[in-house]
Amino acid sequence: MTEDPPEAPTITLTQDRDGEVVELDASQWNHDALYMALRDVLSQATPDPSIWLDHPSDEVDLILERLGFTPQRDLFRMETSIPLQQRTELTTRSFVTGRDEEEWCEVNNRAFAWHREQSGWTVELLREQQQEPWFDPEGFRIYERDGRIAAFCWTKIHPDENPVIGEVYVIAVDPDFHGLGLGRALTLAGYQHLEAAAITRAMLYVDADNTPAVNLYQDLGLEVQVVRRLYQQPDKAS
Ligand SMILES: CC(C)(COP(=O)(O)OP(=O)(O)OC[C@H]1O[C@@H](n2cnc3c(N)ncnc32)[C@H](O)[C@@H]1OP(=O)(O)O)[C@@H](O)C(=O)NCCC(=O)NCCS
């Protein structure tokens, strides 16, 4: 029997709202090769790219430091199988395109007021996302209380991953309704929606220092599979 050849280490260059983004998995590289490959890629990138690196370590931090980059924040990629053991009976509805945008932005931005990236949603940005092939208003679960959006769970299906994986893409509870069990219920509602779409694997990304959310997801059975660390040059980060 022949074994599959090891995957060639890769570095990907993409764009996001803030500019060029370099992505790589440090576990694929030996340290000397990583330094040289990154130096090459950075010499071709725009002056101040962001670097998202999977499986960071102190040694890798030193390599990035030699290239002028410092760690900014860590994300956890958490995963589990679905169905989850916990269930919710909470009734949610689909996002209504053309009607919910403004109110959703207000609730989202209030819930994420402390968050550098997630607090900046605008109706224009949301409309752009609605044009993406993965956007599905059915997978964008809304919970209303007292005639207003109290919480939501926006899911996303990744058909190109094997197995196909369902993501809780953005979830939040309006701060007026924190601590009432809605975060748990909306996360479950999101994953139950994915389960109904025959998805068997679930994941999400969460800031490693978002203790309320990490505690909640661990309690639901999600486990940290990957740490992703963001590096930037100090002048871009400030
Ligand atoms: C994270 C968030 C969704 C939790 O919603 P919530 O409705 O307040 O949480 P719940 O009442 O459902 O609590 C469920 C669990 O969350 C955890 N939790 C909630 N608040 C917490 C806090 N202040 N500190 C620690 N853990 C907390 C606990 O594990 C809790 O379980 P318990 O009730 O058995 O103790 C909410 O705080 C929020 O919207 N935060 C801002 C947006 C955000 O961070 N979204 C997640 C990004 S991935």
Image (cartoon, grey):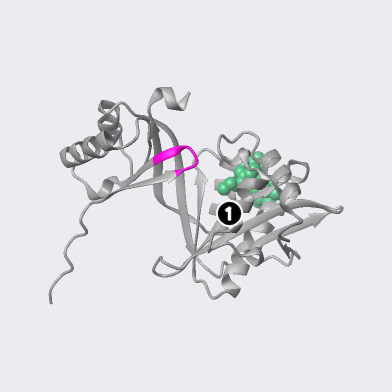
Closer-to-camera residue (111/96) = 96
Side (left or right) of 82 relative to 161: right
Q: Residue furthest left?
A: 1
Region in magenta = 16-20
**Percent from the top left, x then y, of residue 15?**
42, 44
Mark yes or no: residue 26 visible. Answer: yes
Magenta residue check for 232: no
The image shows a total of numbered marks equal to: 1
Callout 1: 10 Å neighbours few (<14), some, many (20+)? few
Residue at screen point 46% across, 47% down: 76
Residue in the image at 82% along x and 54% along y: 145
Q: Residue furthest right?
A: 146
Tell whether 157 sits left or right of 57. right
Q: Is mark 1 within 8 Å of ligand 1?
A: no
Q: Quadrant of residue 58?
A: top left
**Residue at the location (58% across, 68% down)?**
194
Q: Position of residue 80 (x, y in %)?
A: 48, 62
Residue 14 location in percent, x, y?
Answer: 38, 47
Image quadrant holding the N terminus, namely: bottom left
Q: Amino acid at mark 1?
A: Gln
Q: Is residue 180 left or right of residue 156?
A: right
Residue matched to label 1: 129
Q: Residue at x 86, y 54 (%)?
A: 147
Determine whether 225 is above or below 212 in the image: below
User: Does the rendering let one see residue 181?
Assistant: no
Give the secondary structure at mark 1: helix
- Residue 236: x, y in percent? 43, 27
Predominant secondary structure in magenta? strand
For residue 131, side relative to residue 57 (left or right): right
